[in-house]
Image (tube, rainbow, N blue to C red):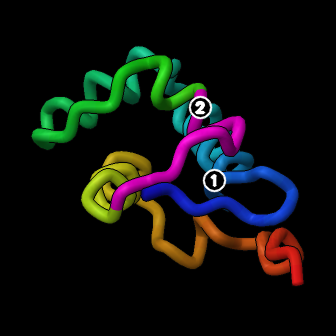
Amino acid sequence: MSYRDLSGNFNIIGENLHKFRMEKGLSQPDLSRELALKGVTLYINDIYKIEHNKRAVRDYELYAILQVLNKTFDDLTEGTENKFTK
């Protein structure tokens, strides 16, 4: 079951994921390959959907993303406090 907020978003990390991926110089295929090396399968289309808030992120995917990008959960959720619709 997937949950989304009232604005239709499935996650809150999309913008920051895109930003940090670009800062690290990784394309979506590069990120997909790096995640596969950690045993996590995220296809390019999945990464696109996450970055555009159209797909939920599983906990193990999030953990692997944080490792690949060398970021913390707080980094990835920075500035997202107002994305929750009340």
Mark 1 and mark 2 lie on one chain; the one further toward the N terminus is 1
In the picture, measured across the screen, residue 35 lies left or right of residue 48, that is left
**Residue depicted at x 27% and y 22%:** 33
Asked if disc 1 and disc 2 are in contact, CB closer than 8 Å, the reply is: yes
Residue 79 in sight in this render = no
**Residue depicted at x 53% and y 37%:** 24
Query: Which residue is denoted by mark 2 in the rendering?
Result: 49
Q: Quadrant of the C terminus?
A: bottom right
**Residue depicted at x 36% and y 22%:** 43
Query: Which residue is denoted by mark 1 in the rendering?
Result: 10
**Residue 48 within the segment the image draws in magenta:** no
In the picture, measured across the screen, residue 10 lies left or right of residue 32, that is right
- The percent coordinates of residue 58 (x first, y second) are 36, 57
- The percent coordinates of residue 3 (x first, y second) are 58, 62
25 lies above or below 18: above
Q: Which residues are magenta?
A: 49-58
Residue 45 in sight in this render = yes
User: Disc 1 versus disc 2: distance between alpha carbons?
Assistant: 9 Å
